[in-house]
Amino acid sequence: MRISTKGRYGLVALLDLAIYGTKEHVALNNIATRQNISLRYLEQMFTALRNAGIVKSVKGSQGGYKLTQPPSKTTVGAVLRALEGDLSVIDPAMAKEPGQTVEYCIQLNVWEKLNESINSLVDSITLDYLLNEYNKLKKELSSMFYI
């Protein structure tokens, strides 16, 4: 399983939204500028995120995007599934029937366990956690002195 550019940039954009969107809506062109992501690409991603109910948009001069839920309720898993689809390590269409013993054994004991672990991990990480880690990292990096 590979996370595409869409998934990676989508997480970057939503973390930016969590950082800057606490009090007001955030325009996509601001995210695009700060994160060096194409505005057209962001528009495509935010359409999928809006359809999944992760963000909402407001039109007008004070418009932009906001998260529909607090960052503590928005998981990395939800974002990745909205942008990437199913997070399986193998194509679900390749699932084996119990009669194919060797391949079915591997499916049950390797592929399905990997899927469970991946989904459990991404569902346990919230935007709030990433926001806190970002703030810690920013503080650590700002206190470093370079000679």
Image: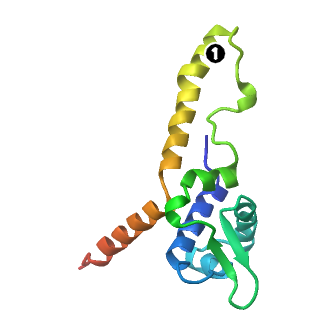
Spot occupied by residue 81 in the image (x, y as percentages of width and height) = 66, 50
Residue at (63, 76) in percent of width and height: 32
The part of the image, by quadrant, that contains residue 103 is top right
| Mark 1 Cα-neighbour bin, 10 Å: few <14, some 14–19, many ≥20 | some
Residue 115's place in the image compared with 145, above or below, is: above
The part of the image, by quadrant, that contains residue 96 is top right
Q: Secondary structure at mark 1?
A: helix
* Left or right placement of residue 38 versus residue 16 in this view: right
Residue 85's place in the image compared with 131, above or below, is: above
Q: Which residue is mark 1?
A: 104
* Left or right placement of residue 87 versus residue 16 in this view: right
Total label count?
1
In the rendered image, the quadrant that contains the N terminus is top right
Label 1 amino acid? Tyr
Residue 30's place in the image compared with 11, above or below, is: below
Spot occupied by residue 28 in the image (x, y as percentages of width and height) = 67, 77
Residue at (53, 48) in percent of width and height: 123
Residue at (58, 14) in percent of width and height: 105
In the rendered image, the quadrant that contains the C terminus is bottom left
Spot occupied by residue 27 in the image (x, y as percentages of width and height) = 66, 81
Spot occupied by residue 43 in the image (x, y as percentages of width and height) = 74, 70
Is 117 in front, or is 69? 69
Q: What's the image's color scheme? A: rainbow
Residue at (50, 36) in percent of width and height: 117
Q: Residue furthest bottom?
A: 61
